[in-house]
Every structure is written in structure tokens, then in C-alpha cells.
Image (spheres, rainbow, N blue to C red):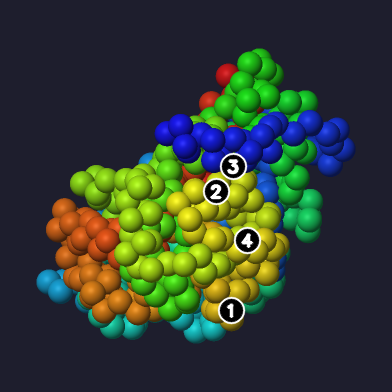
Amino acid sequence: MQIARRILAAVVATGSVLALAACSSVASGAGDASADGGGSLVVAQVTEPENAPDPIIDGSLAGYNYYYNIFDRLVMLDADGTLQPQLATDWEPNEDFTQWTFTLRQGVTFHDGSDLTAEDVVFTYQTILDSPDSAILEYMRVLEGVRASDDGTQVIFDLNAPFSPWPSITTTAHIVPKAVYEALGSEGFAEAPVGSGPYEFVSRTRGVDYVIQRNDDYWGEKPSIERVTFQTIADEDARLNGVLSGSVDVALISPNQVAGIENDSSVELASRVSNGVTFLGVNTQAGALTDVRVRQAIVHAIDRESIVENVLSGRGEATSQVVARTVTGFDDAVGVASYDPELSRTLLAEAGYAGEPIALEYATDGRIPLSTEVAQAVQGFLEAVGITVQMSGMDQASLSTRIYGTQDMKGLFLNTWAPSTMDGDMPVTNMFAGGANDYTESAAAADLVAQQRTVGGDERIGVFGQLANLNIEQGQLIPLYSAETVYAVNPDLTWTPRADGLFTFDATSFS
């Protein structure tokens, strides 16, 4: 650990709390009491959907913050990431998981007063299937067809292959009223959405805010908060300043901002280990990385616990699994790969590694908080065992294009994956079964990905565990940590962060 601390000393020096700049762009009136005492809440959202926020087309986290409050799904994810009934009261597969039958809740109405029926559910899924530009379509690749039962009380999904995690996929599809969507079209519906959820749409001002209000006719438990404004505030200092000044009630902040406000009575901190894993992607076909011993050396050269403690200020959890602890598929039996620099040096010597440069590509902004500091920490650990690291920082858009577009990563690359379904199928498919982060071409890994889809329960978790151990042995991809998501919160607000990072307000209130 002393070696790790020395390696990280320079990195930590750059992670001091930034001075808080004055902010003139935050909303006013956060926490205002409404006529019935429910209150109005202002949320600082980092970004907004790039295109019109249509739940059939858009799959962004920013959009899901709106959709999870305005619309219902057949199955919902609670704050812990556990599947719960919503529009469906129960669901059952056939013997080989190629067909799923969902029984619908009766008596649900949309915000316009019309009844929600099986026809609306079928229409929603079929429209996703028929929309090549839909980001939700990526989740539906296994869906062959959808139909209603003869009596309209059930919806039946026919799949093109066994798929045990199908209920988690239904959490991505927000049910829309067929008549309204057909009348307005995608862009029109985005500007005047109608759902059946606990909140209904009020207004949207591009680049400024998105406002919703409580649906007093909601079929389920009604939220306390009457009105919610999602305000777009990209700058992290401005978001924190908004909470400190009282004009914002909830804001995502960076780990390096925490120390400066821990003793400030005007703000409270709320945090939760996220559903994402930050990892080193590995092009196993590039240069020295073709040798499994070099990859194993990298696995054991990195002190993950030290990165969490010193770069993330303790706000995270070291891991060697691509599935986060909060996500279905995490196996408690799989430990964190050992930090053993002597073993790394031995492996490098056995491989005949002679100092050939290995590229490390990373984003200097965007999806991973403190990404530059994390990349520098990794560089320090690798160079300490004799690996030459060629650093290549770039903006997030450029890195994303290289990973998901050109797919020609030069060696190592820093990336993160957080499945909105809270299920491990999507990340392992992307990383080990032909996705953009898969440079392994490993038949054994791909077979395990396929196998976990054909079983359920503890047996399925065991398959994920086998895949995690195989990956540790082969160094095909190198998980580092799951970061805590940290929020600054109005002290008068009772609110619990979700494991998936979404903002929902069903159990939220002002004191």
C-alpha cells in the first residue's frame, strides 16, 4: 500500500475541491410550498436529450428521468434496482424462456382520461420494433412479436431465443396511448406527452427546463411533491452553488466537491454506489496485449482500493466484475483481483516484454468523474511495474466515436457501463459477445453469455461468476471500480437516491 500511495500522490494533488463560482443560471423558488403543502421541487439535471424527448425513440438517462415519472411500464425498478409489478401484476415464462405472458392491471387510465388497454401495450412495443431510429430497439433484439390475449387481460411476448432476463427489458418501454401517439406523431408527442404515471407533463423549454406536476388521478400511491422542475445545469460548480443558495433542491456533484461541503449546514449529502462499472477496455489483438501474461500483469499491477480511496475520496467500491453489486448478475463469491506488483513483474519477464508502448485512451471530460485523474493513476501503477504507457486524452465525443463507431482502439481504453435495466445481460453481451467493447473473440466467454440467458435465479448468478473468473484469468477486460453517485440535497427534503441514477419522487417530501 505504501507503493500505491506514492504512485497516487501526484494525482490526489489535482483532486482538490474547486472554488465555487457564482451562478446566475439556476432556477429560483426551490422547495416552495404549494397550496396543499406538497411543495415544488427543482432538480439540477446535467444534460437533456439531444433530440425531442419521445419515449419510443429516446433512451438517454436525461430522458428517462422524465419518462419514469410521466409514464408507467409493465415492470418497474424500485430504488434498489429490484423488479416490481407496475402495469403488469405478474408475469410467467414458458419452459425454455422463449415466451413470456404478462397479466395486466385493470382500471388504469392515461392523463387524458382514456383507459389503458392491452392494445396500447402492444402498440408501444410494435412501434419500437418498427422504428429503426429508436434507441430502445437495441433492448428488443430478442423480441420476435407481441400480441394481446383474446380477452385483453394479458400481453404475450414471443422471443427469437431463450431469454430469462426479459422482465428487466420491459422496464425500458414506457407505455403510450395508441390514439394520441398516432395523432401527434413522434415530434408532436414529445412536445405534449400523455402517460399514465404519477406525474403529468406541464411544459418544456429547450435548454432550460422540463416541468411536470402531480397526477391526482393516479391509480397507484400518489406522490407528496406537487410540482417538479428539471433544470438543465451542465456545470458541476453551478449545480452545487444552486443547492447552497437554495434555488435547487437536488443536484449531482463530483466526488472532489464533497470535502468542501461536508460540514455545511445549508446542504446535505446523499450517495449510493452506482449501477455502473468503470473499466479498462483491452484490445487483446494489439501489440504486447496479445500475450495473456502481459494482460495478467496489468490486472495485478493496479491497486483498485487505492484508486477508490485516493482519487475518488473513498466514494466507490473496488471490483473485478463488469456487473456492479447493485445489478443482477453480480456474484458475491467473486473477489477483487489481487494487487501484486511483484507478480506483475514476474509475468512481464516471462512474456519477454521489453517496454513496448501500450496506448491508454481516455476522455478528459464527460461520463467518468475525475477520468483524467483515474487514467493518470492507472498509468502510475503500470509504469511502476515496468510497462510503458502512451497516454492519449480526448473529449468524450471523440472517445465514444472511437469505441462505438470506428472500433479501432489502440490498446487500453478507459470506459464505463451502467445498464438501465439493472441486469447484467447487456454489459456482458457488449463486452464478451460481439459488442463494441469486445476485443476478446473468446468462444468460452461468448458461450457463458449465452448460457446465462437460459437459466434463472442462483444458477444464473453462478454463470455470471464463471464469466467473471474467466475474465480475471484472461485479462480480456479489466474492471476497476463502481463509483458512488453523490448528490447535494436541500436539508429540508426527504429523498433517497436510486441505484440506477434516475430521479423519481414517489417517496419524496419536504419537512
- The mark found on residue 405 in the picture is 1
User: Residues under labels 2 and 3: Cα distance?
Assistant: 51 Å
Secondary element at image label 1: helix
| Residue 134 horizontal/vertical position (percent) | 55, 76
Do callouts 2 and 3 mark residues in contact (Cβ within 8 Å)? no
Q: Which residue is mark 3?
A: 214
Q: Which residue carries the number 2 mark? A: 380
Furthest toward the left, the residue is 95
Q: Looking at the picture, which amino acid does disc 1 mark?
A: Gly
Task: Please state which of residues 439 and 132 is positioned toward the viewer in this rendering.
Answer: 439
- Residue 111 position, x and y percent, is 56, 55
Q: Is residue 474 above or below residue 267?
A: below
Secondary structure of the residue carrying tag 4 is strand
Which circle marks residue 391 in the picture? 4
Position of residue 176 in the picture relative to residue 98 (left or right): right
Report how far apart the C-alphas of labels 1 and 4 lie in the structure.
Answer: 21 Å
Tell me, yes or no, whether the two marked residues, 4 and 2, touch with CB atoms within 8 Å.
Answer: no
